[in-house]
Amino acid sequence: MFKMIVLLKRKPGTTMAEFQSYYEKYHAPLVIGSNPLLRKFVRNYLSGVGNEMYPEDAETPFDCVTEAWFDSEADYQRSVAGILNPEKAREIAEDEEQFLDRDATRWYTAIERESALNPVDR
């Protein structure tokens, strides 16, 4: 599978609860509906871990790490081409303006490596 990661920051003045609610109710369905080649779509909402070094209420550089999986890089490229279609790109951008600091958004592709954990050694 081919993986894309998008780092998102909420719009200034938007609470984390408002950000999550909008993303889940409106933006995620829009993205999913615009990407028929999408195989998995996960949103990871961030907060501090709640210790002295990383307080729970610490401001994070990003509020959400979104992961999107495709069967192949070719499917990813076709999907991106589809959402960059001027009409679809406008629709998505207008929706993002409702809850995102669009200037802070960062897109990456990733090669995922998972380590096997040996329960006997733990």
Image (tube, helix red, strand yellow):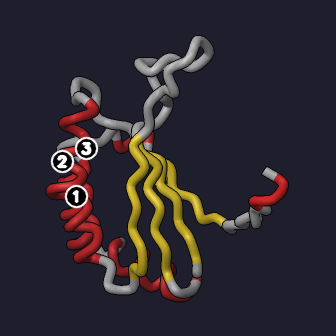
Q: How far apart are marks 2 and 1 (CA)?
A: 7 Å
- Mark before the other along the chain sequence, 2 or 1: 2
Give the amino acid at mark 1: His
Point out which mark residue 20 bears: 3
Point out which mark residue 27 bears: 1
Query: Could you tell me residue 86's position as x and y percent?
Result: 27, 72
Q: Nearer the viewer, residue 110 or 106?
A: 110
Q: Which residue lies furthest to the right in this view?
A: 121
Point out which mark residue 22 bears: 2
Classify mark 2: residues with Cα within 10 Å, few (<14), some (14-19) or many (20+).
Answer: some
Determine whether the residue tagged by mark 1 lies in a helix, strand or loop.
Answer: helix
Quarter of the image with the N terminus is bottom right
- Mark before the other along the chain sequence, 3 or 1: 3
Left or right: 74 in relation to 46: right
Q: Do the residues labelled 2 and 1 touch (CB within 8 Å)?
A: yes
Determine whether the residue tagged by mark 2 lies in a helix, strand or loop.
Answer: helix
Query: Could you tell me residue 69's position as x and y percent?
Result: 49, 74
- Write the residue at 50% across / 31% down: 61
Determine whether the residue tagged by mark 3 lies in a helix, strand or loop.
Answer: helix
Q: Distance between the residues labelled 3 and 1?
A: 10 Å
- Write the residue at 35% across / 44% down: 102
Q: Do the residues labelled 2 and 3 touch (CB within 8 Å)?
A: yes
Classify mark 3: residues with Cα within 10 Å, few (<14), some (14-19) or many (20+).
Answer: some
Q: Nearer the viewer, residue 39 or 88?
A: 39
- Write the residue at 22% across / 29% down: 14
| Residue 31 picture quarter | bottom left
Check the image and report above or below for 34 versus 100: below
Foreground disc of the pair 3, 1: 3
Query: Could you tell me residue 94's position as x and y percent?
Result: 19, 54
Left or right: 18 in relation to 47: left
